[in-house]
Image (cartoon, rainbow, N blue to C red):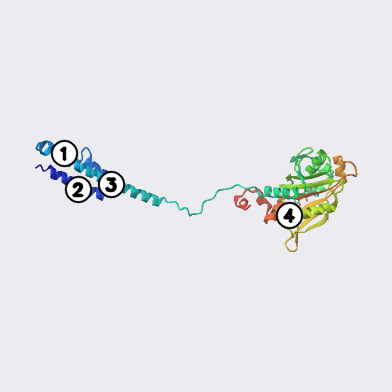
């Protein structure tokens, strides 16, 4: 009997042992090539087949095939095991902990000034006010003369003006919109005029560009007590139902009488929030309303001022710096 049988058995047994001991897929592949490859141990043995007897040859061939099948099966089985193991390891290292808090979406939000403007408009809108707007670059006439601030009037100093050219200014208050609206529409009028205004002014509570909202109510019979009623409603809606208001006599050329209006803040503090008064007859004249027939009140407030009060912001410049840490809080 040819010793090829014992050689085959030796190769086969050794291969099975190596397969069993392989610790990874690369090692396993080396074993496969060294045994079953073209120049592998099995092929080498079969090269000696010519010297075997005619009777042994088919038996050796069958034994070789037998070993080949066994080795292939062992390789397959081991490969499956190693692959499962590799997958386990990968899954363990890449595992997603779904209980961790998410990173969250970066949601945009409205700027506090926009939020405050909308809230003011919503609140007063419930009393039937419409919205009126006007240009930021305004005629000196509508910004000043038409609202009773003549050329050399000292009130012009109160609103240090940016001039754009002869007779053209950046509007210094939303009262300019009020005047435009009165000239463009018949009375009765009940409007809110929001917008940006400009003054040469800059510190923690003053900005060269800020926002105002003007209220104007003109009808046949409108009195100071209507103004107080509207402002009381506004203050309670904005700052809480126990809020009180206080009017202090003040001067604005476009109203007579005029007042500065404070809201109660905490126990015994008062904070100024707006200017107001009964529309000066001169403005009705400028608007072309029939003499002596129309009555009205107007008020104007700084929106930044209201936003600062609502949110406890102590420096108005924060609102223009675009700092996300600040803006995120609204
Ligand atoms: C006016 O501008 C009047 N037109 C308001 C008015 C309208 C009175 C209608 C009567 C009738 P004043 O200059 O006080 O008034 O400004 C009104 C508000 O704007 C102030 O109370 C303040 O809150 C705000 N304000 C004024 N200047 C600045 C500034 N530089 N920066 C930020 N807010 C300001």
Crowding at mark 3 (Cα within 10 Å: few <14, some 14-19, many 20+): few
Q: Could you tell which of marks 4 and 2 lies nearer the N-terminus?
A: 2
Left or right: 122 as drawn, with respect to 217: left
Q: Could you tell which of marks 2 and 1 lies nearer the N-terminus?
A: 2
- Tag 1's secondary structure? helix
Real-space Cα distance between discs 3 and 4?
78 Å
User: Which residue in the rendered view is the most extreme toward the right?
Assistant: 292
Which residue is at the front of the view, 225 or 150? 225
Residue 233: x and y in percent read 77, 54
Callout 4–callout 2 Cβ contact below 8 Å: no
Which residue is at the front of the view, 254 or 118? 118
Q: Quadrant of residue 315?
A: bottom right
Callout 3–callout 2 Cβ contact below 8 Å: no
Real-space Cα distance between discs 3 and 2?
17 Å
Q: Could you tell which of marks 4 and 1 lies nearer the N-terminus?
A: 1
Residue 107: x and y in percent read 58, 47
Real-space Cα distance between discs 2 and 1?
19 Å
Crowding at mark 1 (Cα within 10 Å: few <14, some 14-19, many 20+): some
Q: Could you tell which of marks 3 and 1 lies nearer the N-terminus?
A: 1
Mark 1, residue position: 61
Mark 4, residue position: 237
Real-space Cα distance between discs 4 and 2?
91 Å
Mark 2, residue position: 14
Mark 3, residue position: 77
Q: Kindly identify the residue that appears in the image at 16 percent across and 39 percent down.
A: 61
- Tag 3's secondary structure? helix
Badge nearest the viewer, 3 or 2? 3
């Amino acid at each position: 009997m040819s010793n090829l049988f014992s050689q085959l058995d030796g190769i086969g047994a050794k291969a099975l042992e190596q397969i069993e001991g392989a610790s990874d897929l690369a090692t396993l592949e080396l074993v496969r090539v060294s045994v079953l490859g073209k120049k592998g141990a099995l092929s080498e043995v079969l090269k000696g087949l010519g010297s075997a007897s005619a009777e042994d040859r088919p038996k050796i061939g069958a034994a070789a095939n037998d070993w080949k099948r066994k080795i292939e099966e062992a390789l397959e089985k081991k490969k499956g095991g190693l692959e499962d193991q590799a997958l386990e390891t990968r899954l363990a290292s890449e595992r997603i902990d779904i209980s961790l808090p998410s990173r969250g979406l970066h949601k945009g939000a409205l700027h506090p000034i926009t939020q405050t403007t909308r809230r003011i408009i919503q609140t007063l809108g419930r009393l039937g006010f419409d919205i009126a707007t006007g240009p930021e670059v305004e005629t000196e006439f509508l910004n000043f003369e038409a609202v009773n601030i003549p050329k050399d009037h000292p009130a012009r100093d109160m609103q240090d003006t940016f001039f754009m050219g002869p007779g053209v200014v950046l509007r210094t208050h939303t009262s300019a919109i009020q005047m435009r609206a009165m000239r463009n529409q018949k009375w009765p009028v009940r409007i809110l005029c929001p917008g940006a205004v400009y003054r040469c002014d800059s510190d923690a509570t003053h900005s060269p560009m800020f926002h105002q909202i003007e209220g104007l109510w003109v009808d046949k019979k409108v009195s100071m007590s209507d103004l107080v009623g509207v402002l009381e409603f506004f203050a309670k809606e904005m700052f809480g139902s126990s809020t009180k208001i206080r009017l202090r006599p003040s001067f604005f050329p476009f109203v007579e009488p005029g007042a500065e209006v404070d809201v109660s803040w905490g126990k015994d503090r008062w904070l100024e929030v707006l200017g107001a008064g009964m529309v000066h007859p001169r403005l009705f004249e400028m608007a072309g309303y029939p003499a002596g027939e129309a009555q009205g009140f107007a008020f104007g407030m700084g929106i930044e001022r209201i936003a600062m009060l609502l949110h406890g912001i102590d420096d108005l410049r924060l609102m223009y710096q675009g700092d996300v840490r600040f803006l995120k809080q609204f």
